[in-house]
Amino acid sequence: MATEEHGGGLQIHPMDQFIVKPLFGDGPIEWYTPTNVTLWMAIAILAMTALLVLSTRRRAIVPSRGQSVAELFYGFIHKMVEDVAGHEGLKFFPYIMTLFMFVFLSNILGLIPMSFTTTSHIAVTAVLALLVFLTVTLVGFYRKGIGFLAMFWVSSAPLVLRPILAVIELISYFVRPLSHSIRLGGNLMAGHAVIKVFAGFAGAMGIASVVPIAAIVAIYGLELLVASVQAYVFTILTCVYLRDAVGDAHH
Amino acid sequence: MATEAHGGAGQAAGMPQLDFSTWPNQIFWLLVTLVVIYLILSRVALPRIGAVLADRKSTITNDLAAAEELKQKAVAAEKAYNEALANARAEAAKIIAQAKAEIQKDLDAATARADAEIAAKTAESEKTIAAIRDGAAAAVAEVARDTAAELVAALGGTADARTVSEAVAARLKG
């Protein structure tokens, strides 16, 4: 990804890395076609299995290094769910852990040169965000019935303001999946595109390409941070939304 | 890239993210992936890690309790030890005192016996000395008498034994 050459002068295609291609042959992409999306999601599954299953197979009381990492992930997300979504939210811990592990590993795997970043696609992040939105809405109505709508009626505000606030709350509620998905996909896409642009410069500038290469190194470090932080943000927002559905709403 | 042209001419040049022809594919594989990850996590990984963490917690709690118990035991043992030490010291002091008293008694008895023996020996010696002295005095008187009788005879006198002995006795007393 980062060091790809481009023939013919300064022809940079920063978005080519996001193209979905069939793994075998060159045919049309049906919904079942194994593509690079399939490949990198499968790699994410394998990485997740190695990280959380293989490393813990000894179930040691005194953990090995791998097991410590697995426990770190477990403890981190478990605490986040408990702190943010409340004790009731712990029922959704496997679900949130699934989201976090998928987003985190996809982000990190996407930073491997020549790899494909599944979470840089709006299709993927939109589905993730919609899943969260639907879960929160359905769970909210299931647990609280019509009382779930009370979260739009800000009882702590003056009565005159409440209808206005209700409209604002309602809009913000429905904007959630949009912001939730675009925040993740946009961050990933922008970072990777910037790296690609600098890589294109590096290919065209001869000896002076030290500068863009140094910039790539710096941005790569930043992207590592972004990859982790965006996974964290996505997960913690999920927990925040979930609290509306399971916790005592105090808006 | 070979696939650049695919998926609609206009969109591949822009953002592949907005090439909606690939969306069903991505969404399908995403759902498959999520289900697989969810199953692995909820069936294997999370229960296992949760169990390990719970195990560790209980182990640590048990160990702490055991340590506390052992500490109490150690304190109790130390107390018992100190008690035993104090008892032993008292016992020893008693035994020493007893032994001292016994020795003193023996010593006193031995001293008394020795004193008695010494006294007896002294008395005997004194008796012997007195006898010797008496004997010596008698011998002196006899010698004096004999010598006086001899002297009287040598000087040409005749002396009857009675007179001489009386004279000698008088002189010896004198």
Image (cartoon, rainbow, N blue to C red):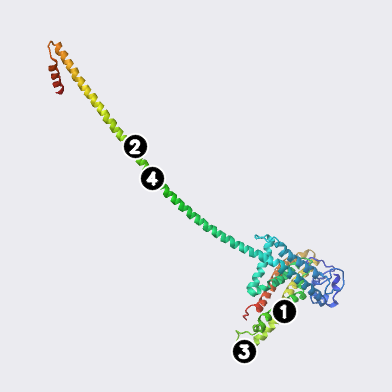
Q: Whole-percent x and y of residue A123?
A: 77, 76
Q: Are the residues at dot 4 and dot 3 in contact (C-beta closer than 8 Å)?
A: no
The quarter of the image holding the N terminus of chain A is: bottom right
Q: Is residue A145 above or below residue B143?
A: below
Q: Are marks 2 and 1 on the same chain?
A: no
Identified by mark 2, the residue type is Ala
Q: Is residue A197 above or below residue B77?
A: below
Q: Residues within 10 Å of mark 1 (few under 14, many from 20)?
A: few
Q: Can you identify the residue that label 3 sits on?
A: A160
In the structure shown, which secondary structural element does the residue marked by tag 1 occupy?
helix
Chain assignment, label 1: A
Q: Is A8 in front, or is A13? A: A13
Identified at 59% across, 63% down, the residue is B61
Q: Can you identify the residue that label 2 sits on?
A: B110
Identified by mark 1, the residue type is Leu
Viewer-nearest of discs 4 and 3: 4
Chain assignment, label 2: B
Identified at 30% across, 34% down, the residue is B116
Is residue A167 shown left or right of residue B14? left
Q: Residues within 10 Å of mark 2 (few under 14, many from 20)?
A: few
In the structure shown, which secondary structural element does the residue marked by tag 3 occupy?
loop
Is residue A160 shown left or right of residue B34? left
**Circle on res. A134:** 1
Identified by mark 3, the residue type is Val
Closer to the N terminus: mark 4 or mark 2? 4
Viewer-nearest of discs 2 and 3: 2
The quarter of the image holding the C terminus of chain A is: bottom right
Q: Can you identify the residue that label 4 sits on?
A: B98
Viewer-nearest of discs 3 and 1: 1
